[in-house]
Image (cartoon, helix red, strand yellow):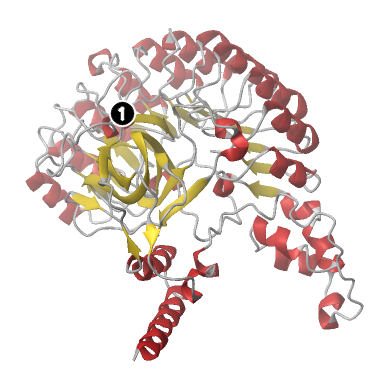
Amino acid sequence: MYPMLTFLSMFYYICLRRRARSGTRGEIMNSRRAIESSNRILPLSVEVVQYAKEVVDFSSQYGSENSLSYTMWNLSGLPNVYPSSGDFTQTAVFRTYGRWWESCPSSPLPFRRNPRSFHSQEYVELVFEEPVYPTAIDVLETYHPGAIVRILACSANPYSQTPPSEIRWETLWAGDPEKVNASQARQFTPCIKQLNFMTNLIRLELNSSLLDYYTELDAVLLHGVRDRLLSLHKPSMLDLDDDDDKDDHSLEFFNGRFTGMTLPEYTKNGYFEKLPYELIQLILSHLTVPDLCQLAQTCKLLHQHCYDPLQYVQLSLQPYWAGLDDTSLEHLQTRCALVQYLNLSWTGNRGSISIQGFSRFMQVCGVELVRLELACCHFLNETCLEVIAQMCPNLQELNLSSCDKLNTRAFCHIAKISGLRRLVVYRTKIEQTALLSILNFCLELQHLSLGSCVMVDDYDLVASVIGAKCKKLRSLDLWRCKNITENGIAAIVSGCRLLEELDLGWCPTLQSSTGCFTKLARKLPNLRKIFLTANRSVCDTDIEELATNCPHLFHVDILGTRMVSPGALRKLLQFCKELCLLDVSFCSQIDSRVVQELNANFPNVSIKKSYTQ
């Protein structure tokens, strides 16, 4: 009887594997975990259940740097909202949602060659009091759930010094982004992988592209034990490595694993070797970078093709942030002499990339660079920006979003990059002096993001220089700029007549009574996106001026105004035929009945009206 049971168990496992190959990565992992769970027992020690003690890093947040409303800090400690549902200020909210931002003038083109299983757009890292072997993770989602796509654990304890070479990240769970039919609160508890190390550092990665509104997170619980989980079963086929379950974001092939390996030189490659060189290059251009590195080890012909610098003109290393280090960059740099578009966002943290390693890479690979993405790269310092300014003479796009460890002096070097067209310094410590220098020397700027830059003292002065110098500006992000007034707006709209996108969300010093919004509407006929979020003074006159003078509007956010009536919104919807998103959440004169009526009459417009249960 027992051999028959063993045979049936193996047959069931094989069936699950075949099914998993056609499913999502989340389904693959869950299938295997379901089998493994029946073979494990918990040790006698009591399970530890703990809420996050501290938030140590994140990519963006809706809230202010100096507040608790809608900030990532709300993820620490006990839940504030759960099990209630709705839009609450006591939750953690990221900066954006959906896919509408992709059509904004400021949105850069996506990088090619990302692994199909890499969906992450945002992240937050949480520290817990006590390191444990995780047995479960609960994420309390209170509004528009479904954005979590990956959960990782780190071997390093943030409260102690760990050499970078000993730090490793392991994926506990991964899945595709989803759109949950109901926006109700839920406890998300995926089946997680068993670790062979203790952890008290957990990272959530999210993708909100399928959601109808901002996702809101309330708290995270880590369940675990102090003693390593034990397994009852003997080694068998179930213990063999499962290729379907490996992390396909691995960088093992970047780091010279096959250095010194003798490659076979086949003399008869059939019709393949008769293909034009360019055609083979085109075929290989559809492979991810680790696949290229692996394929290069097969024979000299493919090695030549896979090491051709033309294969690395566009290179995104963001999906491999967990394993990228100085060694990886060293092995890649011989192939990257022609790279023009480089994405290093999220990489290098906790010492995995050194200043010297980054500098060496830029010295070899910076000459042709046109676009450089460095969001959330906390290893960057003044030396790094100086090297970028020296070694990247053709640079046109630079993203330093959430590089909040950069000191204020570092930003002065950006002024040397006179050809810049896109600059993102969202959530950085850039100060007024450096910013004014950049504006005076970078006259080609078309896209400028200054959102949540709290170190700038006088935004009216900055705005006056923007209006005088940045005549080609098409998008300007002033989200949560604390002190801009009608004088600054007047300078911008008078000098930047090509503006298509303007974010003035949460700018409390702007008052409709000064006529600033009316002047804005009359001077910017090409405007496509306008965010006046949380400005209580926006009134019917402002909306009617936008309707009359800005016919190409497709994104309008007036969340939180008390002065706008349904009649003004009808005029906006009637006149702006291209409008696709209108946020009227917390507008006191616009109730659910009005929203239903407008939705019926203007079905092509997504009208947002959040609620609080």
Which of 148/414 is in front? 148
x 53%, y 12%: residue? 465
Q: Quadrant of the C terminus?
A: top left
Mark 1 closeness class: few <14, some 14–19, many ≥20 residues within 10 Å:
many
| Tally of numbered tags | 1
Percent position of residue 343, x then y: 61, 42
Can residue 207 be spotted in the picture? yes
The correct choice, above or below, for 106 with respect to 22 in the image is above
The correct choice, above or below, for 290 with respect to 34 in the image is above
x 7%, y 47%: residue? 593
The correct choice, above or below, for 400 with respect to 415 in the image is below
Q: Quadrant of the N terminus?
A: bottom left
Q: Amino acid at mark 1?
A: Trp
Which of 603/84 is in front? 84
x 60%, y 35%: residue? 164
Which of 229/497 is in front? 229
Can residue 216 be spotted in the picture? no
Percent position of residue 448, x then y: 51, 27
Percent position of residue 608, x then y: 22, 44
In the image, farthest residue toward the front: 44
Q: Is residue 251 left or right of residue 187?
A: right
x 30%, y 53%: residue? 146
Which of 98/177 is in front? 177
In the image, farthest residue toward the right: 267
Q: Is residue 322 left or right of residue 365?
A: left
Image-quadrant location for residue 524: top left
User: Residue under circle 1?
Assistant: 73
Percent position of residue 323, x then y: 60, 45
Q: Is residue 583 left or right of residue 23?
A: left
Question: In terms of secondary structure, where does tag 1 sit?
Answer: helix
